[in-house]
Image (cartoon, coloured by chain):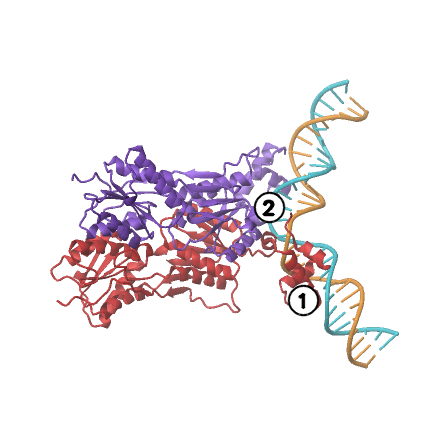
Chain colours: A red, B purple, C cyan, D orange
Amino acid sequence: MKRIGIKDVAAAAGVSATTVSHILNEVAGKRINPETRATVLRVARELGYRPNNLARGLRTSRTNTVGFISDEIATTPHAGQIIQGAQDAGAERGLLLLMLNTGGDPELERKAITLLVQHGVDGVLYASMYHRVVQVPPQLRSVPTVLVDASSDDPAVPSVVPDEEQGGLTATRELLAHGHRRIGFVTNTDDIPASRGRLAGYRAALAERGVGFDPALVVADRSDAPGGYRAARALLGSAHRPTALFCFNDRMAMGAYRAAGELGLAIPADVSVIGFDNQELISENLHPALSTVALPHYEMGARAIARLQAVIDPPDTTTGPAPREVLHCPLVARDSVAPPPRS
Amino acid sequence: MKRIGIKDVAAAAGVSATTVSHILNEVAGKRINPETRATVLRVARELGYRPNNLARGLRTSRTNTVGFISDEIATTPHAGQIIQGAQDAGAERGLLLLMLNTGGDPELERKAITLLVQHGVDGVLYASMYHRVVQVPPQLRSVPTVLVDASSDDPAVPSVVPDEEQGGLTATRELLAHGHRRIGFVTNTDDIPASRGRLAGYRAALAERGVGFDPALVVADRSDAPGGYRAARALLGSAHRPTALFCFNDRMAMGAYRAAGELGLAIPADVSVIGFDNQELISENLHPALSTVALPHYEMGARAIARLQAVIDPPDTTTGPAPREVLHCPLVARDSVAPPPRS
DNA sequence: ACCAAGTGCCCAAACGATTTGGCAGGTCAC
DNA sequence: GTGACCTGCCAAATCGTTTGGGCACTTGGT
């Protein structure tokens, strides 16, 4: 039971393989008798003809295949969303994803890229699992590349990133809108675009409402639950405690929940909490469910594919660069934000 | 800057492409002058020759590519581990993963398989994100396939699954070893291999120690945090409350934490808790950190690739079937288990 | 009746590797 | 000296598709 090829279709339709190819690919500038066309299409369908992508790729040097290189995939649920977004967007265009993740090892990365090129990928998505600045490996220069959740030092390579500042703004506004004026910011200690952007958003939102920025209200620690616990504990245990906390991520928010619990503060009655990332495993399972700001991972994956395709076959003119696409971070309101207690 | 092909190497080494191919592929039964061999190898390396996988695949109908079909990838962190395992194991064999997930939609699944075949994958990994019985799509009959974290109705297709019963046994033993005798089982309501196996393990462990099985100690609810909360609340609020809880998964354990907290019971001083799945986002970030039993996702991915390869090129004889591989679920001890309180 | 243009299709050469079946030339035995 | 055999290499076919360049035949104008 051999797979049937273009020749089989040609034979069955009584024409040459050339003609079949022309018809199925709707080649421009080739004149085909409508009757012949109909016959060929019918026969092809009846026989269940599927072109062999290898042969086609060999001839056209297009494989309908995109490499997906990521640093870490196993340890973060974000990866799944990005992949899913890329995949869905790819499916619409007939693209498949060739996965490869390197754990950040540059040596592995080199091999990975070589492998992908060897397999003739049409382009590469280079994804980071948290928003950061990466150095694009030089081997990628020869392949169309788009960065996902990462910025590059090299402005020539397009990237798709979340709008961290708008996210911080949104989160803080949500607290302000509920009447909070004394808002603590539980942040992390790394100097990455995420921290900088979210802090900027926090400050911008405060400024909008004419609330003064109080450095004592921002406490940094490790970006995990224990870190969030310590930072929140410090803030909530202080004399003039904030009525709401904006946490750098959901893991830190999880720690903040524990801090509040230990101090006998109910969420959201006594203190409101808002997170970031929308890690559903946490945000949905905490009690009360955590209001947070979502990172648009799915969209990043999808948009990255769109960008990549724009690079692979440029529309008509050499489109201007506009290489960096910034995506909106939507609010996901759940149950952890309420008006401040009347003191 | 064209990619260099086998002919370039041949020309540079002063031999024919045939010879180069023979040397690089170490074709058996071909006699090659050691000197020629050395020259060719050197030249190939110097030129950085990489065979074009498309051309090679076209000729040999082997693409060094494996399809990875999964139902859900975006919503679960498990996926990453399986993928990582498969990928690492694949890398050792020069295999790449072609990702495709279908959301369980049979229509999409059909298309996915067609696409993969079109791309000439050597085999397919069909992965489920939780251990269940699946029906293998008929299209997959024509392609070497291995099931990951799933069993099939069809015994002909090999599968790699976790040893749920041993996991339940391990978890319960851990509690018994700390001296607990009255152990609640917070389980879920679905009738899947996971529930059945873990319950069987629970009972087996009790029997080992001569502890009677008390049906009142197993409470089923939805397999999320609220479900775990309700079940744990029921168990811990009862007259003769258990001193330890074995929870069907980490999400339910998270709910059990809240139940204990509300009842003023400290973990692990008043009540010990053990989970299942080792979802690190939860188990590591809970306080105290959750002892749990890990599902061997990484290993499942890796073993599945090994199985797949055994199917693709059988060692020598037609190996017997032994299609179902059951993997060990290791204990991950953290801080949520301690001896029972002296009453 | 003849030429030009147009129509509808096909031939054959790629693409870059693997693989089958030799083919020169040398060695050895007799 | 000659046939058998080995050694070391190569030419050409092949995988399944796309594509540039025709080729034969019809049509329409004059």
Marks 2,1: beta carbons within 8 A: no
Residue A84, which numbered label?
Answer: none
Report the Cα–Cα distance between label 2 and label 1: 32 Å
* Quadrant housing the C terminus of chain A: bottom left
Residue B61, which numbered label?
Answer: 2
In terms of secondary structure, where does tag 2 sit?
Answer: loop
Neighbourhood count class around disc 1 (C-alpha, 10 Å): few under 14, some 14–19, many 20 upward: few
**Res B257 seen here:** yes
How far from the left and from the top, in percent, is residue A115? 50, 48
What amino acid type should be assigned to the residue bearing mark 2?
Ser
Chain to which mark 2 belongs? B
The vertical placement of A269 against B310, above or below, is below
What amino acid type should be assigned to the residue bearing mark 1?
Lys
Q: Which residue bears the numbered disc 1? A: A30
In terms of secondary structure, where does tag 1 sit?
Answer: loop
Neighbourhood count class around disc 2 (C-alpha, 10 Å): few under 14, some 14–19, many 20 upward: some
Compared across the picture, whether A247 is left or right of A30 comes to: left
How far from the left and from the top, in percent, is residue A266? 19, 59
The vertical placement of A171 against B191, above or below, is below
The vertical placement of A324 against A189, above or below, is below
Chain to which mark 1 belongs? A
Label 2 and label 1 in one chain: no
Location of residue B311 by image quarter: top right
Q: Nearer the viewer, mark 2 or mark 1?
A: 2
How far from the left and from the top, in percent, is residue A303? 43, 63
